[in-house]
Image (spheres, helix red, strand yellow):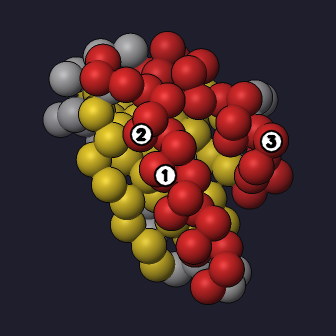
Amino acid sequence: MKYQLVIQFEVSSEEDFERLIEIEEQIESLVGSSHEVDGHDYGSGEINVFIYTNNPNKAFELIKSTLIESVENTMKVAYREIEGEKYNVIWPLGFNGEFEIK
């Protein structure tokens, strides 16, 4: 796989964390075998779900509607080349800030 797609959510409670773990399981079933969910990390008020893919935009399209219904207001999505450092943000549209994993 050429890219790492990161789906990032804000987390403020244990309930948020549990709900987002359920969402991670939904993501895994939606992306199928053409993309690989590589787990998550949790800390500093956020959770990141990592997906390895050859086509980050296509992977995001597969899961976008489910995520927008659940967590649109707290979600950021970005990708980078596996060996790269700079993330390219694809959600939210028009995002001008810097994407980072804390």
Measured from the top left, where is residue 86 in percent x and y? 38, 38
Q: Quadrant of residue 31?
A: top left
Q: Mark 2: give few (<14), some (14-19) or many (20+) Cα within 10 Å.
A: some
Question: Could you tell me how many numbered marks the image carries?
Answer: 3
Q: Residues within 10 Å of mark 3 (few under 14, many from 20)?
A: few
| Nearer-the-camera pick, 100 or 26 | 26
* Residue 70 at least partly seen: yes
Q: What element carries label 3?
A: helix
As drawn, 39 above or below 63: below
Q: In which quadrant of the rendered view does residue 95 lie?
A: top right
Numbered tag placed on residue 41 in the rendering: none
In the image, taking residue 98 as reference, residue 2 lies left or right, namely left
Q: Which residue is drawn at 72% across and 29% down?
A: 65
Which residue position is annotated with label 1?
A: 24
Amino acid marked by disc 3: Glu
Return the mark for residue 28. 2
Q: How far apart are marks 3 and 1 (CA)?
A: 14 Å
Could you tell me if the residues under marks 1 and 2 are in contact, i.e. CB atoms within 8 Å? yes
Give neighbour class at mark 1: few <14, some 14-19, many 20+ (Cα, 10 Å): many
Of residues 10 and 96, the one nearer the viewer is 10
Q: What residue type is labelled 1?
A: Glu
Q: Where is residue 56 in the image (x, y as percent from the top left)?
A: 43, 22
Task: Answer left or right for 30 relative to 71.
Answer: left
Q: Distance between the residues labelled 1 and 2?
A: 6 Å
Quadrant of the frame with the N terminus: top left
Q: Position of residue 25 (x, y in %)?
A: 46, 50
Q: Does label 3 or label 2 sit earlier along the sequence? A: 2
